[in-house]
């Protein structure tokens, strides 16, 4: 479990293939290069849920109050397999941290701002 610089709502791109994924006809499938918004960050397992990436079909049995059928949803992907998208160039970038001193009510506060390494712009 490491410190992550990817947050909920960020735009990320898949930078590696997910092994073992196949289409219905048996051919290999990949989400490599897809971009999507982070729906959830699961810090305990270092995984993220990305909109439209790593879609799975879950076959659910009908129960009282719950309709059965095939439910399609996103599955978590490891955080090392995605990279933040630079807001200016729309390409994957590493993330840096810039600190800024702000004085408010006679106190000095340090703000940490995420910065795209590719363009130098704030995220």
Image: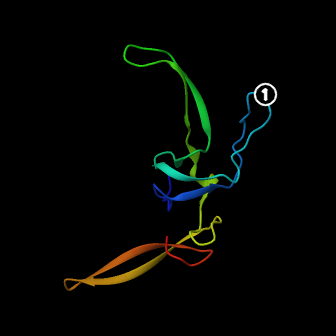
Residue 19 appears at what percent x and percent y?
Answer: 72, 40
Horizontal relation, residue 44 to residue 30: left or right: left
Q: Residues within 10 Å of mark 1 (few under 14, many from 20)?
A: few
**Is 52 placed above or below 108 here?**
above
Residue 89 appears at what percent x and percent y?
Answer: 63, 71
Horizontal relation, residue 107 to residue 2: left or right: left
As rendered, which of 31 and 46 lies closer to the eye?
31
The residue depicted at 59 percent of the width and 68 percent of the height is 86
Residue 45 appears at what percent x and percent y?
Answer: 50, 45
**Is 29 placed above or below 62 here?**
below
Name the secondary structure under disc 1: loop
Image quadrant in which you'd find residue 12: bottom right
As rendered, which of 27 and 69 lies closer to the eye?
69
**Is 117 placed above or below 70 here?**
below
Image quadrant in which you'd find residue 87: bottom right
Residue 80 appears at what percent x and percent y?
Answer: 61, 54
**Is 82 placed above or below 96 here?**
above
- Residue topped by disc 1: 25
**Count of picture labels:** 1
The residue depicted at 61 percent of the width and 38 percent of the height is 55
As rendered, which of 54 and 47 lies closer to the eye?
54
């Amino acid at each position: 479990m490491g410190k992550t610089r990817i947050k909920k709502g960020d735009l990320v791109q898949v930078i590696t293939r997910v092994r073992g994924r196949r289409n219905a006809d048996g051919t290999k499938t990949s989400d490599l290069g897809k971009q999507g918004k982070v729906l959830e960050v699961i810090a305990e397992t270092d995984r993220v849920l990305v909109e439209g990436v790593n879609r799975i079909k879950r076959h659910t049995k009908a129960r009282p109050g719950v309709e059965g059928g095939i439910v399609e949803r996103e599955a978590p992907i490891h955080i090392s397999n995605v990279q933040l998208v630079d807001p200016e160039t729309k390409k994957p970038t590493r993330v840096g941290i810039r600190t800024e001193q702000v004085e408010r009510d006679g106190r000095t506060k340090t703000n940490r701002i995420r910065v795209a390494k590719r363009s130098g712009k704030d995220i």
